[in-house]
Amino acid sequence: QVTLVESGGGLVRPGGSLRLSCEASGRTFTFSQYAMGWFRQAPGKEREVVAAITRSGGSLNYADSVKGRFTISKDNAKNTVYLQMNSLKPEDTAVYYCAADTRLRGLRAADFGSWGRGTQVTVSS
């Protein structure tokens, strides 16, 4: 059983930055043995991948819409995965979810077995 808790969301102006954090925990959970992902879901839209990182952190994947603006990173010592978001746009507005699985099977929501409750990101002037 893995518990994921996101934080760092909020209201930001276009062009601004936010850093999301997701702290993971569990009784028999070893963070370094999990691949992690960030997804987002806007009202009326399907949940989509934003970024994903392998267990070792050696491979990173990004949605085309965020490449060059967002960075995913993983701190195994702190059991935390981050999403640094720069140059934010109104279309980045969504609830952002952290997800985990024992390996990176793919970039669909169905490829991840554990989920956080999400944090709202609103980009507006």
Image (cartoon, rainbow, N blue to C red):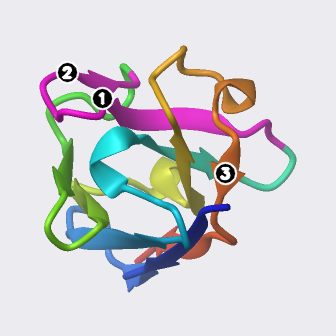
Quadrant for the C terminus in the image = bottom left
Q: Cα distance, mark 1 to mark 2?
A: 6 Å
Alpha carbon separation for disc pair 3 and 1: 15 Å
Residue 88 x %, y %: 30, 57
Residue appearing at x 58%, y 58% in the figure: 97
The residue most toward the front is 28
Q: Which residue is mark 1?
A: 54
Q: Which mark is residue 59?
A: 2
Camera-nearest residue between 123 and 66:
66
Question: Which residues are drawn in magenta?
Answer: 45-63
Task: Report x, y in % for residue 107.
Answer: 54, 20
Task: Decide which of tag 1 and tag 2 comes sooner along the chain.
Answer: 1
Residue 2 place in picture, x, y as percent: 60, 62
CB contact under 8 Å: marks 1 and 2: yes
Up-down relation of residue 24 to residue 42 (above or below): below
Left or right of 71, for residue 51: right
- Which residue in the structure is indicated by mark 3? 114
Q: Earlier in the sequence, mark 2 or mark 3?
A: 2
- Please name the residue shown 33% across and 72% down the image: 21
Rendered view: 67 above or below 16: above
Q: Residues within 10 Å of mark 2 (few under 14, many from 20)?
A: few
Precedes in sequence: disc 3 or disc 1: 1
